[in-house]
Image (cartoon, rainbow, N blue to C red):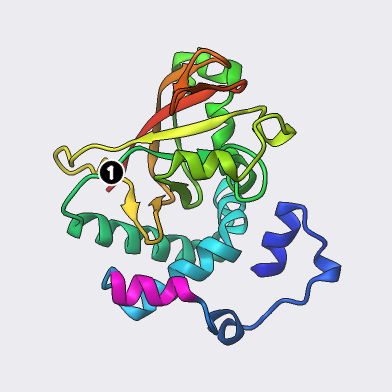
Amino acid sequence: MQAENLRLEGSAVQQTTPRTVDRLLQKFAWVTELRLGLLWPREQAEAFALLSTWGAAALAHALEMRDGRFAASSHMVHDALVRAARSQLLSAPPTYAWLTGRGGLLTNDAAWRFAVGAAVAAPQLRCFETRAVALSSYSAEQMLRSRCAASEDANLGLVRFSSAPPCGAGLRSLVDVGSGRYAVPPLATVIVEKVEEQWQWELAGRRFGFPLTTVSVVYA
């Protein structure tokens, strides 16, 4: 899976030696934070951290192609996040993620193309289903510092996730996964709520030359 993920992300697979699970877990602080800080079961903490970091693109591609090779892994990530969401006492704050670039939503999951530009003008495309875990940060300032707003990666813009309390059987909040990061599971429905064009929105007293797309989610 790691080699497939590298290929889909555009990394040079031939120059990268896939590492064993044991090697990947060594000194992987995220697993410790999930287990001890957020009280995740060990198996779910390890699987989620590994698959989200080194397998997101491969899982998304397999689901899009209806390839069952990684079905068990996709369901493990989904189930771990649903379990955590059901025990979460508060809804997540607004969180942010880039659409493109390293770790971008669209980089890992082609389904996010429906959150881009002209696609959201069509009402039937305002809802779509994720195929990989989507990670975001509660710190907009950190997201903006992480990438130059004038860079090519910023052209498609920033996504703001809006969370809410559960409604009936549907969960509507992103899941706290530690270190200021929040997650949406694969197989969640994303609803595009609003698109604000470049220079037409403001954050921390500044305007920016790329779009801001606000979305909500629902999953079970």
Does residue 134 show up magenta in the picture? Answer: no
Residue at the spot x=82%, y=61% of the render? Answer: 12
35 is within the stretch colored magenta: yes
User: Does 198 sit left or right of 72 as displayed?
Assistant: right
Residue 85: x percent and y percent? 25, 55
For the residue pair 214 and 20, the one nearer the viewer reads as: 214
Q: Residue furthest front?
A: 205
Position of 91 relative to 121 (above/below)? below
Q: Would residue 14 appear left or right of 173 to someone viewing this image? A: right
Q: Depth check: give the residue in front, 83 or 177.
A: 177
> SS of the residue at dot 1?
loop
x, y percent for residue 21? 57, 82
Name the spot of residue 138 as percent of width and height, x first.
39, 45
Task: Please determine whether, in this image, residue 47 is positioned above or below residue 80.
Answer: below
Inspect the image, locate mark 1, and give the three-letter code of the amino acid beneath it.
Ser
Q: Quadrant of residue 157?
A: top right
Please give left or right for residue 109 compared with residue 123 in the image. right
Residue holding disc 1: 173
Main SS, magenta region, reads helix
Q: Which residues are magenta?
A: 29-37
Query: Where 162 sits versus 11, above or below?
Result: above
Name the image quarter holding residue 192: top left
The residue depicted at 69 percent of the width and 36 percent of the height is 153
Q: Is residue 143 above or below residue 1?
A: above
Residue furthest toward the right? 14
Which x, y percent locates residue 30?
Answer: 45, 70
Q: Which quadrant, please, contains the N terminus?
A: bottom right
Which residue appears at 51% of the width and 45% of the height?
142
Counting labels gives 1
